[in-house]
Image: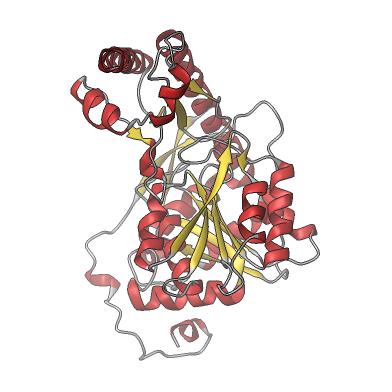
Amino acid sequence: MLPLEGRPGQISLLAGKPNENTFPLTAMQLTIRDPLASGKDMAVELSEDELHRGLQYGPTNGWSELHEWVYGLQVLQHGRHKGEGWTVSVGAGSQDLVFKAANAILNPGESVLVETPVYAGVLPIFDSLGCEMIEVHTDADGIRPDSLRSILDNWPATKPKPRVLYTVPYGSNPTGATATLERRLEVLALSREHDFLIFEDDPYFNLYFGSAARPPSYFALERDQPESGRVLRFDSLSKIISSGLRVGFISGPEPIVRAMDIHSMEVNLQPSSLSQAVAYKVLSTWGYDGFQAHIARVAEFYRAKRDAFEAAMQRHLAGLAEWSTPEAGMFFWFKLLLSDPSAPDAAADASDHDSEDIIRRKAFERGVLALPGTTFYPSGAKTAYVRASFSLLPPEQVDEALRRLRETILDARRERAQSQ
């Protein structure tokens, strides 16, 4: 009944809201960058009404003004309009929304399709539901439809097919891969053929810095398909505005989003009103032109970070690792070559390479932290791959980290050679 409080003429005795006059915060001024003025600082202040609303309970699915901004963004970036059977809801980051979507759709013990290697943060979500995670192979061009088709075409007749596919299509965490347009269309066709939903977890959509045009999202592509409503799109402000604000939003079929809102009512009531007030103040001050200019600057920032990291990899890891150049996101996914390729039986020896001990123990002892590839496999499979983030470190620290990693790999090669 809470939404009824907004109707004109109503005198509400309904909610147990604290009185705003007891809150100690009386004003809030922000200094933000103006992306249309070369990033110069500008001062903005929350109005008295915005501050009061930001300090008070609010709608479970988020501020209506922020909803309208999201609708406008989806028109601008994905060509999706109201009235197409989808709606939006705001959450405490996209991780919160992925969790609630999984709980709304999946029954305990069901199978779920996950691109692999997969973002490690979703493994506990599916584990908590007792889901069987079916690994769909990926490569430098993203998810492999041939792997997905093989799994589904050969699915046991006595077992219910998976109803969800989870994917990170731009700058995938951990691989950095961006799925091609052709593969996205094939996956959409398979979703209709085999009747599953696509969880499009897309925090790096706005961190695309590839030289080619950015391929359309699944959310955009399904608009022109024979049927829509199979894509749940998860967006986040974490990588482009602030990770600490914890503001994300879902765009998807209305019945599913409504079920997620009921979950929020029972668990955390709503996303933070104050975070939404700050986020909306920034976004509304900029307008869509300012927002587009801002994300262009952010993408260029990460492109420069990627280039500096790859240059250091060429200096220190050429011949000791293999990698594909990411075109979005903030990660390199590279394979350690732990045997000297000129050594006898090097190819056979490479079959059992695993980065786990080298990264967790030996690289750590040399003062380098990264993640071994097995972290991103639901099965815990051994792999020679490693994930490294290029988002934070200045070039001199990147150079030193990769120099230390080079020494670690060379030590591992010597140990292997001596043990054979």
Near-viewer residue (281 or 96): 96
For the N terminus, the image quarter is bottom left
Vertically, is 17 above or below 239? below
Residue 400 coordinates in the image, percent (x, y) = 30, 13
| Residue in view at x 51 percent, y 62 percent | 112
Q: In the current view of this chain or complex, which residue is farthest to the left?
A: 365
Residue 383 coordinates in the image, percent (x, y) = 41, 35
Residue 203 coordinates in the image, percent (x, y) = 50, 46
| Residue in view at x 32 percent, y 17 percent | 409
Vertically, is 292 above or below 337? below
Residue 24 position by quadrant = bottom left
Q: Is residue 113 visible?
A: yes
Residue 415 position by quadrant = top left
Q: Is residue 62 visible?
A: no
Residue 159 position by quadrant = bottom right
Chosen colour scheme: secondary structure
216 relative position to 316: left or right:
right
Near-viewer residue (180 or 111): 111
Vertically, is 130 above or below 234? below
| Residue in view at x 38 percent, y 51 percent | 121
For the C terminus, the image quarter is top left
